[in-house]
Image (cartoon, helix red, strand yellow):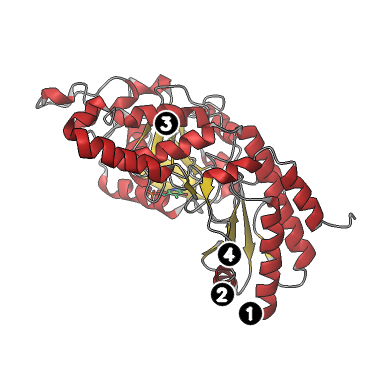
Amino acid sequence: MSAGITEAELRELDARDPLASARSLFEVPEGMIYLDGNSLGAMPRAAPERLQALTREQWGVDLNSCWSGRGWLDLPITVGDKIARLIGAAPGEVVAGDSTSVNLFKLLCAAADLRPGRRTILTEDRNFPSDLYIAQGIERFVAGGLRVKLVPREELVGAIDDDTAVVMLTHVDFRSGYLHDMAEIGRSAAERGALVLWDLSHSAGIYPLDVNGCGVDLAVGCGYKYFNGGPGAPAYLFVARRHQDAMHQPLCGWLGHAQPFQFATEYRPAAGIVRMICGTPSVLGLATLDVGVDLLLGHDMAEMRRKSVALTGAFIGLVQQMCEGAGFELRSPADAARRGSQVSLAHPRAERLIAALAERRVIGDFRSPDILRFGFAPLYVRYLDIWDAVLTLKAAVDSA
Ligand SMILES: *Cc1c(COP(=O)(O)O)cnc(C)c1O
């Protein structure tokens, strides 16, 4: 047994942290320990300026000519190409826009269309609710008799069969932080002729993803969590190059048309990823998303993962050390290799404890029925924050 983690040790880790200077690029309120970046990422300091410039110098001055003159219309692709670099995709494989839920709808329908004769959307029963609901909506409304099959995680790989059109999974589980083996599931699906669709909402931006290296077919992800794109920032979707020419999606609006400004009567899909676009891009949202993505691209993702593993490991270690007997149960994988940048603790008084922490300016979130969830964004969370957060947790549980 070691003597445990000390405050001095954590100070030392901050002093040697190659990512330490990144925190100054964010607005983190004085005195707040923000462990909720997996829900809404912190604001990059450059974001308000970008919005100011876009509104005052573009919208307010050149109005409608900005669509082409200032590249507004191309933002889904220019921002998408940057996101591609964060997830191991190539240029022309990612488009930014719409919400994660809407992009899931497009891709699930498109996946089924690519696998005619197969009728199952396979997923795990604890997947993020919106992802499940979207699949259920397709089951109800899309002709052809698609069905959603929910299985426990341990049964996933065995449940892929020759009726499986697409396996839809979230890479890092929002409740527990469990991180799937993307390559292994991809191999199992490919062996049986099924496509794989990953939701990267809780892994992109904190984990060195390699969608092409893992043979991923399709993916979606969120812009306002670890991408720090701002409240309601647009999401993104990925389609591997090899599928694009044969791919059709149901929300085929005018900006996915081969020639939108010919205003033709018949839909004809644009070449490549552009056909996945529906309508007019959310320019203000894409502008702040671009700021968040640029900020991530300025830092080494492998380094971010190293720090994230160290932060979650220190948090788990300190909870064991300081809060023994206080009734917490670790609900995240103890094995760092299977853990995202999140630690979930179960406690019978979880909801009250999260509120008590917030009063003391330590922000996590509560997930029903009994989970305290803490996210660790490696660009703005410090090692010493872990010490202070667990001390505060200890004080809260002692007085609650
Ligand atoms: C955050 C999140 C979403 C969000 O979907 P919206 O359409 O942006 O509301 C979807 N799926 C997962 C797995 C998420 O974590």
Mark 2 residue type: Arg
Q: Which residue is mark 3?
A: 238
Label placed on residue 400: 1
Left or right, 132 with reference to 153: left
Label placed on residue 206: none
Question: Residue at position x 40%, y 47% from top?
Answer: 148
Circle nearer the N terminus (1, 2): 2
Q: Nearer the viewer, mark 1 or mark 3?
A: 1
Q: What is the spatial separation of the Cα atoms under label 1 and label 2, in whole angstroms?
A: 8 Å
Give the camera-side residue of 303 and 380.
380
Mark 1 residue type: Ala
Q: Which residue is mark 4?
A: 371
Q: Relative to residue 177, is residue 303 depicted above or below?
A: above
Give the camera-side residue of 167 and 28.
28
Q: Horizontal and vertical percent for residue 163?
A: 43, 36
Which part of the image, by quadrant, shows the N terminus?
Answer: bottom right
Q: Secondary structure at mark 4?
A: strand
How many numbered marks appear? 4
Q: Is mark 1 within 8 Å of ligand 1?
A: no
Q: Does residue 197 appear in the picture of this structure?
A: no
Circle nearer the N terminus (2, 3): 3
Q: Secondary structure at mark 3?
A: strand
Give the camera-side residue of 33 and 148.
33
Circle nearer the N terminus (4, 1): 4
Question: Residue at position x 53%, y 54% from top?
Answer: 28
Q: Secondary structure at mark 1?
A: loop
Which part of the image, by quadrant, shows the C terminus?
Answer: bottom right
Residues at circles 2 and 3 in contact by the CB criterion of under 8 Å: no
Q: Horizontal and vertical percent for residue 283?
A: 29, 38
Label placed on residue 352: 2
